[in-house]
Image: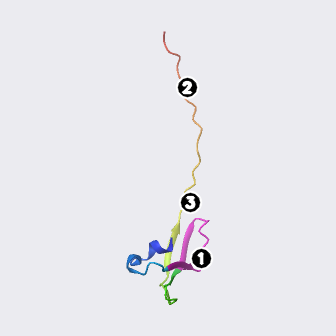
Amino acid sequence: MAQELVKNAKSLPANTVYKFVPEPNFAKAGTYKTRIRLLYPDNSMETSQEVTVSVYDHTWKAKKTVIKRRPAPF
């Protein structure tokens, strides 16, 4: 998920590790301010400026619908 927020991720080395620092609790809906830490294959590291991540609650409840049918006119 952190990699999706890095605009130039395609131009970085293939084994780069992307991590949120600190790691927000994405299990709860809300807006989180965090940073992205990049760990490159040569063990060098870079931390981004603060980014805002929004998590939305996509739970929805199924509603039981009963369809009443008229008897066929014979």
Where residue 47 appears, x then y in whole percent? 50, 86
Pointer 1 residue: 23
> Does residue 8 appear left or right of residue 58 in this picture?
left
User: Which label sits in the foreground, 1 or 3?
Assistant: 1
The residue range painted magenta reads 17-34
Q: Look at label 3 and name its amino acid.
A: Asp
Closer to the N terminus: mark 2 or mark 3? 3
Position of residue 57 measured from the top left corner of the image (x, y, whole percent): 56, 60
Residue type (three-letter) at the residue carrying disc 1: Glu
- Which residue is most to the top? 74
Q: CA distance from mark 2 to mark 1?
A: 51 Å
Q: Up-down: is 65 above or below 33?
A: above
Task: Tell whether position 60 is magenta.
Answer: no
Q: Which residue is mark 2?
A: 68
Whichever of labels 2 and 1 marks the residue nearer the N terminus, that label is: 1
Give the SS element for disc 2.
loop
- Residue appearing at x 59%, y 74% in the figure: 24
- 38 and 33: which is toward the camera: 38
Q: Position of residue 27 (x, y in %)?
A: 61, 65
**Separation of marks 2 and 3 at Cα, in angstroms:** 33 Å
Measure how far apart labels 1 and 3 are at the Cα level: 18 Å
Q: Secondary structure at mark 3?
A: loop
Between 20 and 42, the one nearer to me in the picture: 42
Q: Which mark is residue 57?
A: 3
Mark 3, other Cα within 10 Å: few <14 / some 14–19 / many ≥20: few
Q: The disc labelled 2 sits on which kind of residue? A: Lys
- Tag in front: 2 or 1: 1
Pointer 2: residues within 10 angstroms few (<14), some, or many (20+)? few
In this rendering, position of residue 41 left or right of residue 7:
right
Provide the secondary structure element on which disc 1 rests.
loop
